[in-house]
Image (cartoon, rainbow, N blue to C red):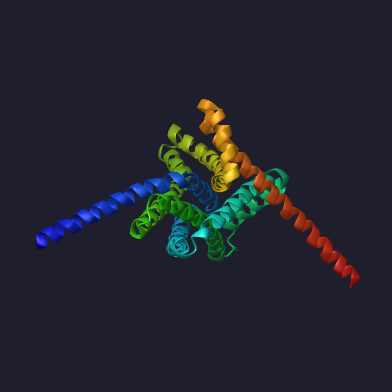
Amino acid sequence: MAGTSLLTLIDDIATLLDDVSVMTKVAAKKTAGLIGDDLAVNAEQVTGFGANRELPVIFAVARGAMINKVILIPAALLISAFLPWLLVPLLLVGGAFLAYEGAHKVHHKFFHKDEEKREHDELRQAARDENVDLVAFEKEKIKGAIRTDFILSAEIIVIALAAVAEQTTDFVTQLGALIAISVIVVVGVYGLVAGIVKIDDLGLKLIKKNDGESALGSFLLNASPKIMKGLGIFGTVAMFLVGGGIFSHNIAPIEHLFHNLANAAGPLSGALRYGLDGLLGVIIGAIIVALLSLVSRIKPAKDEAADGAA
């Protein structure tokens, strides 16, 4: 009798793990764009430190990212259980934020080149200046990276939960899938970030080891900045695609319109759908950037008028 119960328990656990595995794959597919964006954003944020401090900073941010998910998973499950109608509005807010972040990056790149270069130079100088309190500097950077991760993690968790909830209502399976995708994101993203920021160091070591002659070392040394730049571009594009996709998949008229347009494209339907999502993301982001720019211009004008009246 005890043996039968044990076999039943093992069978139940195996079934649960299989269900969690399937749901994790569903969640991973839905959040792939955001995970790529998370990778690009974090790789960009942990650069600028000395070679001996890059990995400790990455591990500190990874620890904060895991804490973020420990907070977000129960919060998302509670909202799903008691306020399910709130999930879509939260998704739309997150989608709008991602579209804005992408548009802000593009706007900053083209219209604030001098400011961007100055910030980059200040970051490099702070990392090398002996008079700068690197502990405080690191803590501030780590806090900023963890805040950014919190926003992206919230979006990943909500999208993953929405995808899993469509397939199953079982609480344990949903919880298991969210835990699994969170571990995959943290280990995968920050593991890759650690590898990327160390590519140039590996190249330099190979060159020194071979008395300045190493084709592979030179390749890695030259490839590192290009990889970082490519990740930055990929991250921005991902923001538009995911942000626009959230709106197009959760607003029925837009979903219907994009579906019909994509079907009319035949073999290119998939590519066109991505393009439409990206275009929608660009439009939403541009509108938000324009509105915030307008508000920032009006506010100082009002403050000046008030000071003049006083």
Query: Where residue 162 sits in the image (x, y, percent)?
Result: 46, 53
Q: Seen in the image, is 7 located left or right of residue 202?
A: left
Query: Where residue 151 sits in the image (x, y, percent)?
Result: 54, 57
Instruction: In this rendered view, identify the residue nearer to me: 240 or 106.
Output: 240
Residue at point 46% right, 49% down? 193
Residue 181 shows up from this direction: yes
Residue at point 56% right, 28% down? 264
Query: Where residue 271 sits in the image (x, y, percent)?
Result: 53, 32
In the displayed orientation, state which residue is furthest to the right.
309
Instruction: In this rendered view, identify the residue nearer to me: 141 or 175.
Output: 175
The quarter in which the N terminus is drawn is bottom left
- Place residue 259 in its image quadrant: top right
The quarter in which the C terminus is drawn is bottom right
Residue 52 shows up from this direction: no
Instruction: In this rendered view, identify the residue nearer to me: 152 or 91.
Output: 91
Q: Seen in the image, is 218 located left or right of residue 132?
A: left
Query: Where residue 127 sits in the image (x, y, percent)?
Result: 57, 56
Asked if 219 appears above or below 108 in the picture, the reply is above
Residue at point 49% right, 63% down? 83
- Place residue 106 in its image quadrant: top right
